[in-house]
Amino acid sequence: MAEKARYSMLFLFWMIMLTVLCLLPSDNLSVKTPPIPYLDKWVHFTFYAVAMTLGALFMRERMQFRLRRGKALLFMGAGLIIYGMIIEVLQGISEQGRSAEWWDIGANILGIAFGAGLSLLLFRNVSVFYWED
């Protein structure tokens, strides 16, 4: 059973970690980093690219024979965009030192698009992950 739920568990873990990191008070996340331009946007991009890739594998694991690949990626992408918007709203209304930004949502969407493209490459070119459309 655990073998069949491997990607589901990874996706669930990633989404829980992402939620916690996005909703923690910002002073809990104070980390000394070199001054990298737009670091926050790169972090958003990366978090959501990984979320989309794991989400696509989750959908393949759960829906491979009941849902076509393109439709599954569309559902996952739309779900992650809505999730990202909800997180931004929660950051905006919380009093935890976080703020909502439109540019964060843009970085999330670009990360989701990148993750979808990566997933399509995996599903077409890696035999273990092949998912016919």
Image: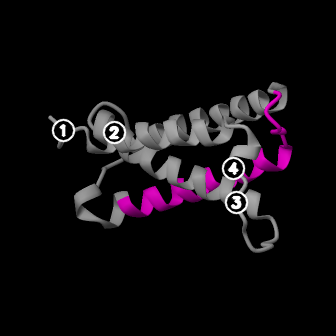
Displayed quadrant of residue 100: top right
Q: Earlier in the sequence, mark 3 or mark 2?
A: 2
Of the two numbered discs 3 and 1 in the rendering, the one whose residue sits closer to the viewer: 3
Q: Position of residue 52 (x, y in %)?
A: 51, 48
In the rendered view, would you say 128 is above or below 15?
A: below
The mark found on residue 31 in the picture is 3
Which residues, given as a range, are shown in magenta?
95-122
Q: Nearer the viewer, residue 113 or 29?
A: 29
Contact, CB < 8 Å: mark 1 with mark 4?
no
Sort mark 4 into few (<14), some (14-19) or many (20+) by Cα contacts within 10 Å: few
Contact, CB < 8 Å: mark 3 with mark 1?
no
Residue highlighted by disc 1: 2
Sort mark 2 into few (<14), some (14-19) or many (20+) by Cα contacts within 10 Å: some
Contact, CB < 8 Å: mark 1 with mark 2?
yes
Q: Earlier in the sequence, mark 1 or mark 4?
A: 1
Displayed quadrant of residue 85: top right
Contact, CB < 8 Å: mark 4 with mark 2?
no
Main secondary-structure element of the magenta-colored stretch: helix
| Residue type indicated by callout 1 | Ala
